[in-house]
Image (tube, rainbow, N blue to C red):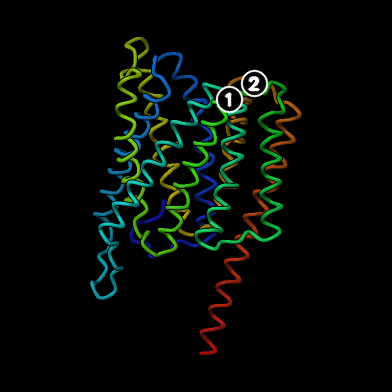
Amino acid sequence: MHDVSSPALPVGRGLLYVTVAATAWGTAGAAASLLYGSSGLGPLALTFWRTVGGLLLLSAVRAVLRRRMVRVPDSVARPQEPLRRRVVRMATTGIALAVFQAAYFAAVESTGLAVGTVVTMGAGPVLIALGARLTMGERLGAGGVLAVLGALSGLAVLVLGGGDSGTVRPSGVALALLSAAGCAVMTLTTRRLGQAGDAADPYGSTISAFAVGAGCLLPFAVAEGLWPQAHELGRSLWLMGYIAAVPTALGYGLYFAGLTAVRAATASVISLVEPVSAAAIAVLFLGEELTAGTAVGTGVLLTAVAGLAVAEARGAVAARTGRAGAAMVR
């Protein structure tokens, strides 16, 4: 993750951060499936502990980096975000994060993993692209639209290609759409923060979102059953620690940092790498068969993501060249 003192993040590094974040997220499902069998935790309790663990880890990392950070003179210090705006941003991002995670787990429980994943991850980029166009004027262009369509096609083949698409239940589809909407609000809020130049501390943004999200999840986690079973407690704690550290603290920290440099719609499409990493783990470590649908879907999705990343990087270079030319004219 990048230093909290850095004034700006290059687009190339932002693309890398979002890609690594999506890859890390793809490991969460496998870890959670192992955890459910031994801990007795439900999806809401697991999401709560995941959020709390990520909050504690990121807070520790941020404290270490703050001690190492070189002080910026007051004359060149960045303007502080107004208190009211900061509170609204923290509340919006945190609630959206809680809705995104909890509604997704509920959708999977209601209508199955395949359908819940396709609806959530398929609707997410569409909602984010529309929201970015309406609220920030971001345009994908013809190539970007083709990349989005290609990525969604690859995702559908990847997830549904195994032949068992599960039972489609309207309640589960509605929950999946709610999850996608939560992801869209979280992404657009963070991206707008980065565009406004207030995201010098992405750790602070992530920590505040986790704190609000944990507070929202706590009463539901208590009602579901907050504590893991004593049976195989050591294994359960190890898996919970992994979920908190890698797909949560690392994943969301990198994602929020990457959004300061990468367009919201681009980040949402790159995030579709998540089911690719999940499928790879299932084949390599969980003994699942590599089907033709998995192979074809993975290839199509990765090709679309790579094309969109290249287009994003070229756009950034063109923008820098244009600004340099304008400066020379002046």
Q: What type is the residue that disc 1 sits on?
A: Leu
What residue is at 62 percent from the left and 31 percent from the top?
A: 280
Q: State the residue position of label 1.
A: 113
What residue is at 57 percent from the left and 83 percent from the top?
A: 325
> Label 2 crowding class (10 Å Cα cut-off): few <14, some 14-19, many 20+?
some
Q: Nearer the viewer, residue 57 or 293?
A: 293
Q: State the residue position of label 2.
A: 166
Task: From this view, report whether residue 255 is shown above or below residue 213.
Answer: below
Is residue 23 rendered to the left or right of residue 201?
right
Is residue 52 rendered to the left or right of residue 38?
left
Task: From this view, report whether residue 160 is shown above or below residue 258.
Answer: above
Q: Earlier in the sequence, mark 1 or mark 2?
A: 1
Counting from the top left corner in percent of width and height, residue 177 is at 54, 36
Counting from the top left corner in percent of width and height, residue 131 is at 53, 53
Q: What type is the residue that disc 2 sits on?
A: Gly
Q: CA distance from mark 1 to mark 2?
A: 8 Å
Counting from the top left corner in percent of width and height, residue 269 is at 60, 47
Report the number of discs: 2
Image marks 1 and 2: residues in contact by CB distance under 8 Å: yes
Is residue 103 rendered to the left or right of residue 95?
right
